[in-house]
Structure formats: structure tokens, C-alpha cells
Image: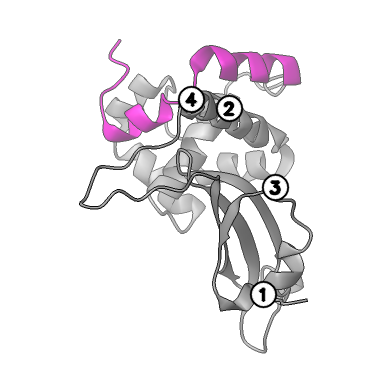
């Protein structure tokens, strides 16, 4: 069987097969589910994010349009929207968290052999201490669906606070808050390694 038949297939198979199977087995995520396995659900949600699908219908129709190719991903058929909606509502979402940390540790182990080395462009420029970047972004939501996420009269949203580690360009820490939480308030609850170089914009200034 061809495992890497498309760009999407290549992205999906970056998740180690043996490790994800072990996660599903130990967590019992496929227990009582004979047809719709966890891997099929994960493929559908990956397609949602990478394809920027806006609805369950787009996910179902998008995967259905490439039915012959999704077999290379290890899933037999595209799911209909009602099956996917029921799975997202009833099945344990913790499997996504465990798969994320599995993939994160795998990537982190490859960057720990040495810091990320950019291409040389003119003058040599390097920080001796660890370099971190701190920023926050608002992710807008529909106020009718997410009534808890109001931050002004007409919009709803949550705020992602992220620390980027420039050794390997990997996120070091991330937290989600309501959109009206000040960036500096979230930053004060974070821990930073001693002697690191931290870059941020003016919203994080606090001379006290």
C-alpha cells in the first residue's frame, strides 16, 4: 500500500503510527466503536484545519471527493456529517491532546541536538542565551454559538497567549483565555527560564 500518496497523506503520517495506536489502546478510545475508529476521526479533523473547512459538511464532502486517495491514509471511507457531529459531541477529546504531546515530544527530540541554525545572511548574529518571543492573538467566534466568549457588543472570541522558543521554532507554552483578558495579566502568570532573552511588543511593558 502506498503510504504517501498526497501532501495531506504525508502530513498525516508524520504522527508515529505505533505511538498513536498505543495511545488509542491504553486510553480505550476505540472501545465500543466498531466502524468509526479514532484514526478516522483524527484524519477528518486534520483535514478540517489544513483545508480550512468551515463546517462539518465541508469536511464530509471534501474527504468524499477524494475517496480513492483517503484509503492510503488507513481509513476506508469518508464520514457523513451526522456521524462526525455525534463523535465530536460524545467521544472523548483527550486523545487529541495525547497525540499532540506525542508529536511534540518527537519533534522536540530532533531539535535538542542543537539550536536551529538559520542560513547565513551577511553579518553573524546570534544570541548566547535562550531566545523566546511572547505574543497574543484574538480568535473570533460567533457570539450566538459561544455566548460565554463576548468581548464587545457585536463580537465574541478567545485569546491565545503563546511563547515561541526559537530553538527549533517550537511553541514552549500556550494558554487560552477570554478575549478581554489583558496580555500583561496572562504574561505575569507564566514562568520564564533565568537569563533568557524575551521579545515582546509594547502591550507587555510593565516597569514595576
Q: Which of marks 1 and 4 is nearer the N terminus?
A: 4
Q: Mark 2 points at which residue?
A: 105
Q: Does 12 lie within the magenta span?
A: yes
Which secondary structure, mark 2?
helix
- Residue 158, image x and y in percent? 65, 67
Q: Which of 154 and 59 is in front in this view?
A: 154
Which secondary structure, mark 4?
loop
Q: Which of marks 1 and 3 is nearer the N terminus?
A: 1
Q: Which residue is drawn at 65% across and 51% down?
A: 174
Residue 164 at least partly seen: yes
CA gap, disc 3 and disc 4: 33 Å
Which range is magenta?
A: 1-28
Q: Does 69 lie within the magenta span?
A: no
Q: Mark 3 points at which residue?
A: 194
Q: Mark 4 points at which residue?
A: 15
Q: Residue at x 49, y 19 (%)?
A: 16
From the viewer's perspective, is the residue at label 3 or at label 2 nearer? 3
CA gap, disc 1 and disc 4: 35 Å
From the viewer's perspective, is the residue at label 1 or at label 2 nearer? 2
Q: Which of marks 3 and 4 is nearer the N terminus?
A: 4
Q: Do the residues labelled 3 and 2 touch (CB within 8 Å)?
A: no
CA gap, disc 4 and disc 2: 11 Å
From the viewer's perspective, is the residue at label 1 or at label 4 nearer? 4
- Residue 21, image x and y in percent? 59, 15
Amino acid at each position: 500500500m502506498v503510504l504517501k500518496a498526497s501532501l495531506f497523506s504525508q502530513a498525516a503520517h508524520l504522527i508515529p503510527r505505533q505511538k498513536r495506536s498505543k495511545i488509542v489502546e491504553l486510553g480505550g478510545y476505540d472501545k465500543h466503536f466498531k466502524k468509526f475508529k479514532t484514526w478516522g476521526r483524527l484524519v477528518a479533523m486534520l483535514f478540517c484545519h489544513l483545508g480550512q473547512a468551515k463546517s462539518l459538511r465541508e469536511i464530509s464532502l471534501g474527504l468524499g471527493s477524494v475517496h480513492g486517495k483517503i484509503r492510503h491514509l488507513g481509513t476506508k471511507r469518508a464520514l457523513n456529517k451526522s456521524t462526525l457531529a455525534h463523535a465530536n459531541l460524545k467521544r472523548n477529546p483527550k486523545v487529541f491532546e495525547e497525540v499532540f504531546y506525542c508529536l511534540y515530544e518527537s519533534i522536540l527530540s530532533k531539535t535538542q541536538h542543537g539550536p536551529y541554525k538559520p542560513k547565513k545572511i551577511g553579518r553573524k548574529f546570534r544570541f548566547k542565551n535562550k531566545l523566546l518571543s511572547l505574543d497574543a492573538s484574538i480568535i473570533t467566534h460567533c457570539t450566538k454559538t459561544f455566548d460565554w466568549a463576548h468581548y464587545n457588543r457585536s463580537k465574541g472570541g478567545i485569546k491565545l497567549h503563546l511563547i515561541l522558543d526559537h530553538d527549533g521554532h517550537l511553541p514552549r507554552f500556550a494558554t487560552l483565555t477570554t478575549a478581554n483578558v489583558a496580555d500583561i495579566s496572562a504574561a505575569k502568570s507564566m514562568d520564564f527560564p533565568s537569563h533568557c532573552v524575551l521579545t515582546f511588543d509594547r502591550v507587555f511593558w510593565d516597569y514595576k
